[in-house]
Amino acid sequence: MLSTGALRAHLLAARLAGPVATPRETSLRSYRLFAARDPRVLLGLDPDRSWGERDLLGLMAEKCGVSDDPGHVSGPDVIDPERTLAALDAFAERLSGAAERRAPVLFGTGHPHRLLGFYAGLADAMSAAGCLVLTSAQGRCVDITTRFGVRTYNLDYVRGVALVREPGVRVPGSATGAHSHSPLPVRAVLEEAVEVGGVLPELVVGDHGWVCGAGQLGIEAIGLADTDDPALFVGEAEGRVSVAVPLDDAVRSDYYRPLTRYVLDRACLSQ
């Protein structure tokens, strides 16, 4: 079993928490865009209240541990490892509850290059616990607006984790996909499940639009988020996202393996 102290040390050594690679400038830009309700950073969330830049800075200081000083405008952002650990414990508790009731679960990521292994380990454990890990709408086309215009992507699943990929870039089943913030993929999955009379998830686990898109539709959602992803933390503050775990979401993929172990241990799902 991985101790809390050992994971805290790993978080800091791998720069998953503490001073992280996400620049302060990038985080502040995201807060400005969110305050202006730019869909690129809303990630499918429709906030109940008006969030100004100072409101968001205060929220992110509370949830992540970033500096709440608006005069601090450059350098690396900072995540408090104690907040990461507390959120991982809450994340594990939600997984444990879903496993106990054998709830259908959907896993999806907009960071397949980095986080696929983390979610796949959880999906394997939930499946072993008797949960149905959903794979609806595989191969379905999704049109997503990007900085290059509208691009068509295909939904795919790798080890039970949903992602999107550009047609023809990789064969289905390969472990790479496109980086995406869009909520449209999770909406497509849910729409197809409804259309065919299939099973809807009781829990969605992931990041970016997978979490906010599901939470906005009233489905319990938990996930990981960096300091430049305020939408998940706003969703948590407004009750649409159950747990948002603050950490750097773009370090080496193998650095997330200890987090998988820790979460599964805490959820009593270790095999």
Image: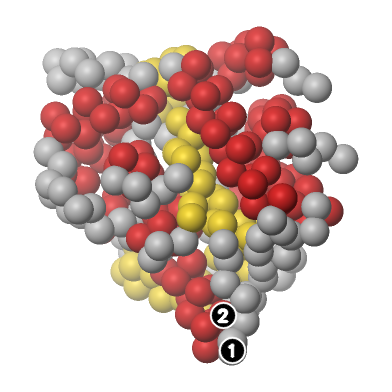
Can you give x and y, in whole percent of width and height, for residue 237 in the image?
31, 40
Quadrant for the C terminus in the image: top right
Is residue 116 visible to the viewer in this orientation of the structure? no
- Rate crowding at label 1 as few (under 14), some (14 to 19) or many (20 or more) other CA atoms within 10 Å: few
Q: Is residue 44 visible?
A: yes
Q: How many marks?
A: 2
Q: How is the image coloured?
A: secondary structure
**In this rendering, position of residue 86 left or right of residue 125:** left
Q: Position of residue 35 (x, y in %)?
A: 15, 44
Q: Which residue is mark 2?
A: 193
**3D distance between C-alphas at marks 2 and 1:** 6 Å
Q: Residue furthest right?
A: 271
Place residue 15 in its image quadrant. top right
Which residue is at a point 65% across and 52% down the rendered structure image?
98
Horizontal arrangement in the rendering, residue 245 relative to residue 33 (left or right): right
Identify the residue shown where x is 12% and y is 47%. 50
Quadrant of the snapshot with the N terminus? top right
Q: Nearer the viewer, residue 63 or 258?
A: 63
Residues at circles 2 and 1 in contact by the CB criterion of under 8 Å: yes
Circle 2 Cα neighbour tier, 10 Å, few/some/many (<14 / 14–19 / ≥20): some
Task: Please tell me whether residue 32 is drawn above or below residue 193 in the rendered image.
Answer: above
Q: Secondary structure at mark 2?
A: helix
Q: Is residue 179 above or below residue 251?
A: below
Identify the residue at the far bottom of this view: 196
Q: Residue furthest front?
A: 101
- Amino acid bearing label 2: Ala
Residue at which label 1 appears: 196
Q: Position of residue 157 (x, y in %)?
A: 67, 65
Name the residue located 48 percent from the left edge and 67 percent from the top edge: 186
Q: Residue at x 26, y 30 (%)?
A: 59
Q: Secondary structure at mark 1?
A: loop
